Image (cartoon, coloured by chain):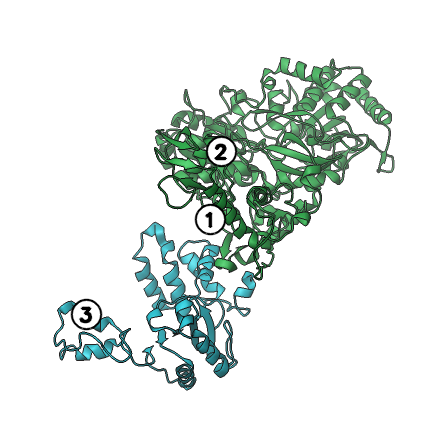
Chain colours: A cyan, B green
Amino acid sequence: MSINSRIADDQPESFAFSAESKKAIKTILAKYPKDRKASAVIPLLDLAQRQHDNWIPMKAIEAIAETLEMAEIRVLEVATFYTMFNLRPVGKYFIQLCGTTPCWLRGSDDVTRCIHDKIGIKSGETSADGKFSLLEVECLGACVNAPMVQINDDYYEDLDYETTAELIERLSRDDVPPAGSVQGRQGSQPLPGPTSLENVTSFPKTAKKTQSASGKAQKSKAQDGGV
Amino acid sequence: MAMITLTVDGVEVEVEEGSTVLQACETAGKEVPRFCYHDRLSIAGNCRMCLVEMERSPKPVASCAMPAGPGMVIKTDTEVVKKAREGVMEFMLINHPLDCPICDQGGECDLQDQAMGYGGDRSRYQEPKRAVENKSMGPLISTIMTRCIHCTRCVRFSTEVAGVNDMGAIGRGESMEITTYLEKALASELSGNVVDLCPVGALTSRPYAFNARSWELSHTESFDAMDAVGSAIRIDTRGNEVMRVLPRVNDDVNEEWISDKTRHAIDGLKRQRIDRPYLRQKNGRLAECSWEDAFKAIQTNMKKAKASQIGAIMGDQCDAESIYALKSLMDKLGVSNVDCRQDGSVLGTSGGRGGYIFNSGFNGLEDTDYVLLIGTNPRHEAAVVNARLRRRWLNDGLDVARIGAPVDLTYPVKELGDDPSILMELADGKGPVATKLKRAKKPMIIIGQGALTRKDSAAILGAVARLSKETGVVTADWNGFNVLHTAAARVAGLDLGAIPGKGGMDTGGMLAAANKGDLQVLYLLAADECDLSAISKKTFVIYQGHHGDAGARAADVVLPGAAWCEKDGIFVNSEGRVQYANRATFPPGDARSDWSIIRALSAVLDKTLDFDTHAQLRAKMIAEVPVFAEADVLTEAKLGAIGGKGKIASTALTTPIGEGTGVSFYMTCPISRSSVTMAECIDAFEQNGMKGAAE
């Protein structure tokens, strides 16, 4: 695949960071020494992608290169290295499907099949209505709840054919389900519920923190006082 | 430098601290196969071919990236090492096509050679192979990217040495590809070197594509005459045809790089050649004639002329022998209108030898800590020298300042403007630049032809001399007064004293006289770069050279000479380094070595020069000018009082070639002007914004 087949055919004429992004760039750059500006290339690519409808045009690559005083090819190298950067437009819901061994063993093939059945797209394709894009990626680090997909910024875990179908159905109505395990388990605890530490009535302080950091952050916060 | 001792295959070796295990193995005389490692590039460690066994390491280590430590025990010839390398080779060959019979690299390919030692005789690989689209990288580099093994030498070269951040590797894993940003041509004057660096046939020379096989070529070791750097080259010929030019290693001069002009202008040797004598007819056209007729015409016109009405100008690519022969002939005729400086520079008239050479030598660039450029664009005048300056900036942050046009040199330069009159103030040691020069331990001034071909050049030289004295550029043990030449013949010409004698006219004077018709005879020895467009019909112009260029157009009689690679000749580079270039091919048709033409003509003119062979000529020349005796050494030259006083005008300093001068880097001599490849380069790089190079 040459560069021309990796990037979008229709490139916008120009790209400029929004005022908000510019503010964010300032914060990001402050994290690195002045002569190590290039370290900010990944956060800036992410920023550009969020600002530009979930994909990065070449003009943005050039703008980042200029901001960070890097060669354009160096930015492009990074942008093409990571699958999370899109160099062509993607659908409203960008599905990254994990096909690495743990997910595959737990049935990621069913998920792929379901997406193909329901939306009619394969990896690397976008649906005709521009709503969905699919990309098969390597491990996203949620093996405990395999198989899983990442849709835009959220993980949906413990999928099978049926739940994937439901997920797609809801998304096509723009009814975005809550992120996390579709089977409702919290974090990676056993499916039927806790099997140990069931009767603990109070947690040490650090443990509270651990719990509130897990999947359902909102809910745990509400329960904080009661536990 | 502290030394450390380690054992390689049971042999104890001592290496400098900071060396790698691979270097230690080489010290021990062990050959370690490698693809990505290269002496002059940063270490990547990504091909894994250089695996060796190291005691107390559970796995083989990549020797190129492993620092040598004291007491290490390295083994390079064990079964483990062989197996490991075979494994690496098998992976490399998985996606490498079996192109060898049709690949230009075949016969001189690292992968091919090492596959003989470590490759299997059959493939175990059953899966689909990957194929990669070829990339467009300009008129000099042809790409067959499926052959690429991702050593990234080309990427590192273009980033580190050439200073153009255009090449990179996009994608990852199996879909990794080497490319340039949006496939633009590699806009560097050194781009051809990536072809030499490529260990496989992924990047090959485009002009040379499918022209010859490496084993059918004869090799001649010689020196380059396209610029005044004197790069060591190897000229590869088949029959009487120059097929290609490759660099030779010469650490003192070009390291192992050459510029694209050096490498690719050679196709100009086949075009526009003068292969027989010509005489201008009454109808104004040149017609073929015999040597006798040509000489007769010269004899008739020479006889008519007084010595003061004869002039001789030597061109930029002449060998020392032909300059010497012509100078001797003119001396015998009593002619003092002789000049080897067709650009009209003021060099050679004062200051002795030290006044016109690159005194510190190019190796001085390794020691200097402050460089002031005056009227020079080293990137286009001496590309490989510029690469050394860039490396110093990259490694040590070398400070470079410039008086002259602000063109991109691939490293940051402090601009002092293009107005040379600031030298008057600077010469008195005033201003921050003077302070910097003073503070530097080994400061250097590089003065280019742009500053030396002006009306006020004597004053500029004078000011620079004062500045040098004032700020320690020239001290007892350091001479940082450096003249950068653009013409390969210039230093030899100045060494031979081919400048106007008493009452003689210089190039400008001769041309003015010729334009008015006051000069009876003008002898142009391969001089094509001066303005010959307005020469009066009364002046009889003799052009002796190898290409039908400006000189031949203006000529009344044309004598077919030899190009630089068609004769044994002595060249002296900017540093004053004497180089014996060797003949690679014969001149075409009736063309002859230039010295022998002049020798034959001298007999016709009854002023027979007293040498009959090339060896006699050399012996005589060396007796007169002893510097020619020893090749490839730098003799310290005295720098006498140089330049004059006077006002320096504030007209902007220009450079002789490169950006914004009207003279393209790719076309500076008759050979490169006749080269199709060079014309293609101009087309390609014009589109890519390397503006000046493409006038």
Quarter of the rendering occupied by the C terminus of chain A: bottom left
Q: Residue B340: percent from the left, percent from the top? A: 64, 26
Give the structural element (helix, strand or loop) at label 3. Answer: helix
Residue that label 2 marks: B30
Q: Residue B551: percent from the left, percent from the top? A: 73, 34
Give the residue displayed 30% in from the left and 81% down from the top. Answer: A184
Q: Chain of mark 3?
A: A
The reply to the same-chain question for discs 3 and 1 is: no
The reply to the same-chain question for discs 2 and 1 is: yes
Q: Chain of mark 1?
A: B
Q: Using the numbered discs, state the Cα–Cα distance from disc 2 to disc 3 in whole angstroms.
A: 60 Å
Q: Residue A17: percent from the left, percent from the top? A: 40, 66
Depth check: give the residue in front, B162 or B605: B162
Which mark is first along the chain, 1 or 2?
2
> What's under tag 1, amino acid-wise?
Asn
Residue that label 3 marks: A209
Q: Quadrant of residue B298?
A: top right
Residue B46 numbered tag:
1
Q: Eyeballing the image, is B517 above or below A210?
A: above
Q: Eyeballing the image, is B471 above or below B334?
A: below
